[in-house]
Amino acid sequence: MKDFCWSEADLNYLAERILNGKRRELTLELALKCKTEKEKISFYEKLVNSLNDADDDSWLGNVEQFLAEYGIDDEEGELWGWLQGLTNKESEKEMINSLKNEYPNVAELIKNYKLFQFTSWFEDDLYKLSIEEDCTDIDLIERELQEVDPSLKTKLEKILELKRKEK
């Protein structure tokens, strides 16, 4: 990889990864302060509405795990589709209206799903492990930058400084 030529775009991407890692660390810190079901559900809803993490395939894998854990047979994939698209109050209302005949306890199901997601990600350390993995990757890349060309590390620090001021 030492033959790789680091462009400005590559350094910008790395800077974004570093800043995203810092945001994720703060997210985890805030999540772990949630104690009640209401706080956890509210946090989960805000997270899904604000972060790109919700687009991660791991969230979708958790839908299947949730259905299995709750013993829900969703052969058609309809419930899975609704849960993976559950991103705001509007989609929640649509889901309740659409599924209330097939799943009379759909509102409770939604609540349990949100708590399941919160627990899976924050209380079971999945989010923490994901952050640690990113940090390890970033550390390796930064060390390589230093080895390849120490001025690249300086350029990265300047880009980070500018990006922090933008936010």
Image (cartoon, rainbow, N blue to C red):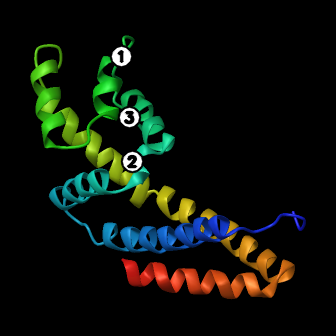
Q: Vertical placement of 127 versus 155: above or below?
A: above
Image depth: mark 1 or mark 2 in front: 2
Secondary structure under badge 2?
Answer: helix
Task: Please state if 113 lies on the left or on the right of 150 as rendered.
Answer: left
- Looking at the rendered image, the quarter that the C terminus falls into is bottom left
Distance between mark 3 and mark 2 Cα atoms: 16 Å
Tell me which numbered mark, 3 or 2, is placed earlier along the sequence: 2
Q: Which one is nearer the viewer's eye here, 21 or 152?
A: 152
Name the image quarter holding residue 106.
top left
Name the image quarter holding residue 8.
bottom right
Q: Vertical placement of 116 versus 126: above or below?
A: above
Distance between mark 1 and mark 3 Cα atoms: 11 Å
Would you name the residue on which mark 1 appears?
A: 73
Q: Which mark is residue 66?
A: 3
- Residue at screen point 81% across, 66% down: 5
Q: Which one is nearer the viewer's eye here, 121 or 60?
A: 60
Q: Which one is nearer the viewer's eye here, 14 or 103?
A: 14
Would you name the residue on which mark 2 appears?
A: 54
Distance between mark 1 and mark 2 Cα atoms: 24 Å
Q: Position of residue 56 (x, y in %)?
A: 47, 45
Q: Which mark is residue 91?
A: none
- Looking at the rendered image, the quarter that the N terminus falls into is bottom right
